[in-house]
Amino acid sequence: MAIQWKSDADQALAEAKKAKKPLLLDFSAAPM
Amino acid sequence: VYPNPKVEPFIKEQFVPARFHIKDQQPAFQRFNAQWTPTILILDSDGTERHRIEGFLPSDDFLAQLRLGLAHTARLTGNFAEAERLYRELADDPTAKSVAPEALYWAGVSRYKATNDGAALADTARQFQKRFSDSLWAKKASVWAA
């Protein structure tokens, strides 16, 4: 199954805090 | 490096992943000071940046960087035992050669931080005399030699 990328930084930060997991933020110019 | 049979499962298991495209998500680039693509940031669960990867890497090197980022996150949030474990795995992993000297260095630092025993640093300096002796990290550790 492919990675389910989030596109909202605040939503990702909130989920990471709740799950106590680190975040991976990918800044890209490649086609998505 | 996406999709990749080693990278994708690792990201899904270890991180909350978010992705931003330069064409339509410029505010996120500015917010996190991403000035080149690709840039990968690893943040701890409180949102503090702990590791930055700039530029493309092949999958083995990229995966090693992600693992290094997890180890840095553990160390910089005070989880020194977990950090040392992660760093030593990297230092001994033949697929992670690109980060192995750095991992050995920080493994020694993590041990020292956990124990406050200078012998951890002296032991690391001795290991660098046998491994990765030509690396920048060996030079950094050379001041610890007893």
Image (cartoon, rainbow, N blue to C red):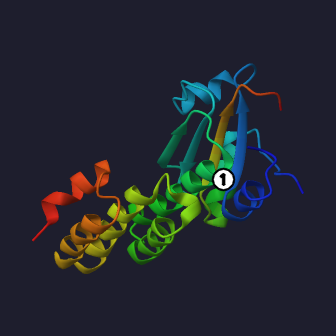
Q: Which residue is mark 1?
A: A14
Residue farthest to the right, as pictured: A1
Residue B70 as seen in the image, left or right of residue B118: right
Q: Nearer the viewer, residue B47 or B142?
A: B142
| Residue B57 to residue B85: above or below | above
Residue farthest to the top, as pictured: B23
Residue B87 as seen in the image, left or right of residue B47: left
| Residue B96 to residue A29: above or below | below
Residue farthest to the left, as pictured: B146
Tell which subunit mark 1 falls on: A
Q: Tag 1's secondary structure?
A: helix
Quadrant for residue B8, please give it: bottom right
Kind of residue at badge 1: Ala
Question: Percent position (x, y) of residue A9?
Answer: 67, 41
Question: Percent position (x, y) of residue B30?
Answer: 56, 25
Give the residue displayed 35% in from the left and 59% down from the top: B132
| Marker count (numbered) | 1
Crowding at label 1, few (<14), some or many (≥20) Cα neighbours within 10 Å? some
Quadrant for residue B124, please give it: bottom left
Give the residue displayed 67% in from the left and 58% down from the top: B15
Taking the image as drawn, is residue B126 in sight? yes
Please state, as top left, top right, bottom left or bottom right, where the C terminus of chain B lies in the image.
Answer: bottom left
Q: Nearer the viewer, residue B7 or B98?
A: B98
